[in-house]
Amino acid sequence: MRVPGSLDFRVLLSVLAALGALGGCQKAPAVATTNAAFVAGQAAMKKSDFKTAIADFTAATTNGGPVDARLWYDRALAHYNLKEWAPANGDFTEALRREAANSTDLGTPFVHAAYYYRGVARVSLGQWIPAKSDLLLAVQYYPKTWLDWDSLGYVRSQLGDYKRAVNDYDRGMRYYPADWNDHFNRGIALFHSGDQLRAIADFTAVIRHEPRLGGPYQYRGQSYFSRGDYKLADADFSKAIKLIPKAWSWDYRCETRENLGRVSQALYDCNRAIAYYPTWAQAYIDRAWAKSTLGAQKGALADANAAVKLAPKWAVAYRYRGWIRGQMSQYRGAFIDYARAIRLAPGYTPARQARTSLADWIVAAQRAGVTRFGLASLNVEQLENESAPSQSEYSKRASLCGGYFSSDDSYFDDCINNGVDEAKNDESSDNQAEQQAEADNYEVAQQVQEQINYQTQQAEEAQAAANEAENEAASESENSSGGYSEESSGGEQQTESEPEPESAPEEAPESSSEGE
């Protein structure tokens, strides 16, 4: 959004002269002094000498003469051009107050401009709701002014009202369609509202006009990423990085390359992103995923812990930390993290799916007879259905757990939910499981899955044997009922039919693979 420059306004000499007249007598000194200061301020405004103009206008308000709303407006405009947003906001407010009180006739053009400029000043002050109110009034005064609609769209985007922001940009661009800044702002609103094709079109229009700007490449890359066009996204993020060396695109490209299977390159990008933005939780989560995928589980857990510290109310961080703990055989910690993610965001489906998947896998392992890695002692039903303690109980437990467990660790939650002794046992069990996993030559998950597959195959073979016995019993019963005579070729038939019951075990590997 652009901030317009100073405007050259007409000096209302006739009004000033009228203010100086008093019953046909000579001007009173206060009136003359006020008028002179006002005229001096106007002259300074024409020269863009805004500081002098402010001094003159201020003198005009303190000389005792009558003060018109136009004076407050002009002083506000001088503050505005100096980017002194707070005093500009105050003076525009006073000008509008005097106009509303009918103490002066400021005129429609000036009233419209006062609402617009005050709205922009409030944007710079971060006062988004009051800014929106001002800009809504501004577009009512002049609905064909594209800059008002552009500014209103920008404010609505900042408030997260992206669909209405798109409508505002559409209204304004009817009157000035060639402005690349409007295409960029509308593209951002379209991206957030989910209309990626139109967003890509807007960002492409900006790139054609300003190919040396990195922002449009970065946002277009995000739109491509949202559509699953990872190669196009990678190309745009790479271009953005060339144009903006410290671009957010380092992390965006990291995540893109993870989806392309280029995990080592992704890790490099995440390292750069964190070097530039060491408090960006998303970058730590992306790097944690890369490290875990490359087998560096301890480093992955450290990054996930960092993300939780930086964003303790971000459900995604707990979900990924839960996944990493599962990779490290820290199953209790994984369930605790999934539960925290779901408490923070009850509608967060990926966390629920991850918890269910882990629970199903552990139940299958227990049924298969797996006793290592702390699996035998887990009560999956209890872990899945744990409830958060009341506020008073939480405070009581926190005082007991805080001395031993850090508040950013999942074991603090375990302590809160299950008590100090149980949490210590869980921690010891998980540590043993992790050490045992590190001592083995391949992944714990692979070992457990092999045992599950073996148990499944054994069960299927047993079922096949039972089916064979049942078939034989049925055949003997049929023979004893006189279905075949000894003189018939029953012996040959019996010999030829023997391979049939053996065919069932041959199908077991296919069924087992489906179970994987």
Image: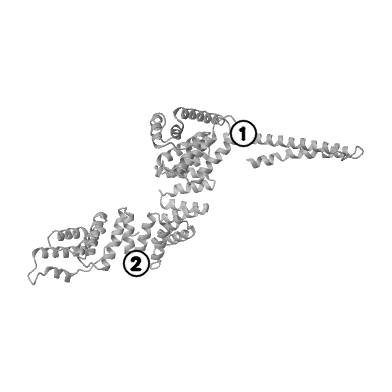
Q: Nearer the viewer, mark 2 or mark 1?
A: 1
Quadrant of the image occupied by residue 69: bottom left
Residue farthest to the right? Answer: 487
Provide residue 161's location: percent of width, then percent of height: 40, 56
Provide residue 401's location: percent of width, then percent of height: 41, 30
**Viewer-closest of 306 and 344:** 344
Tag 1 residue: 367
- Alpha carbons under labels 2 and 1: distance apart: 71 Å
Give the amino acid at mark 2: Thr
Query: Is residue 76 in sight in this rendering?
Result: yes
* SS at mark 2 in the image: loop
The disc at residue 188 is: none
- Crowding around mark 2 (Cα neighbors within 10 Å: few <14, some 14 to 19, many 20+) is some
Q: What scheme was used to colour the molecule? A: one colour
Give the position of the N terminus as an image quadrant: bottom left
- Crowding around mark 1 (Cα neighbors within 10 Å: few <14, some 14 to 19, many 20+) is few
Q: Is residue 352 above or below residue 424?
A: below
For residue 425, side relative to residue 452 (left or right): left
Tag 2 residue: 145
Quadrant of the image occupied by residue 490: top right
**Marks 2 and 1 close (CB-CB < 8 Å):** no
**Residue at 52 percent of width and 54 percent of height:** 229
Provide residue 137's location: percent of width, then percent of height: 32, 63
